């Protein structure tokens, strides 16, 4: 499967009631590595660079 298809497939699971940031946090909570191509593309698509860094810092502190 092409990488773009994987990103589209994952993005389609985004709950329409949740924000992209909420979805990103969910993916991290269930164990997705923030460096995987799916996460990287999702962060790029939704401009969540700063949010991802803040979330990773918060997790490292806690």
Image: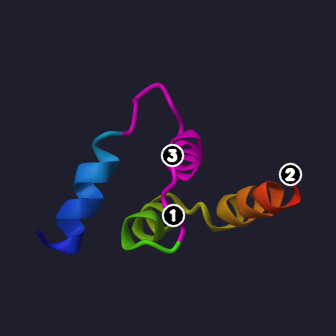
Location of mark 1 (residue): 43
Location of mark 3 (residue): 30
Instruction: Give above or below for 37 relative to 16.
Output: below
Q: Give residue 55's position: percent from left, percent from top.
A: 73, 56
Q: Give residue 45's position: percent from left, percent from top.
A: 43, 63
In the picture, measured across the screen, residue 10 lies left or right of residue 39, that is: left
Picture quarter containing residue 16? Answer: top left
The mark found on residue 62 in the picture is 2
| SS type, badge 1 | helix
The mark found on residue 27 in the picture is none
Which mark is nearer the camera, 2 or 1?
A: 2
The stretch in magenta equals 14-34
Instruction: Give above or below for 19 relative to 56.
Output: above
Q: CA distance from mark 2 to mark 1?
A: 22 Å
Q: Residue at x 58, y 39 (%)?
A: 22
In the picture, measured across the screen, residue 8 lies left or right of residue 48, that is: left
| SS type, badge 3 | loop
In the picture, measured across the screen, residue 37 lies left or right of residue 28, that is: left
Neighbours of disc 2 within 10 Å: few (<14), some (14-19), many (20+)? few
Give 28 or 2, whichever is nearer the viewer: 28
| SS type, badge 2 | loop
């Amino acid at each position: 499967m092409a990488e773009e298809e994987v990103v589209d497939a994952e993005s389609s699971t985004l709950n329409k009631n949740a924000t992209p940031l909420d979805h990103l946090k969910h993916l991290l909570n269930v164990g997705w590595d923030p460096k995987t191509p799916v996460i990287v593309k999702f962060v790029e698509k939704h401009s969540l660079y700063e949010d991802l860094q803040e979330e990773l810092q918060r997790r490292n502190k806690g």
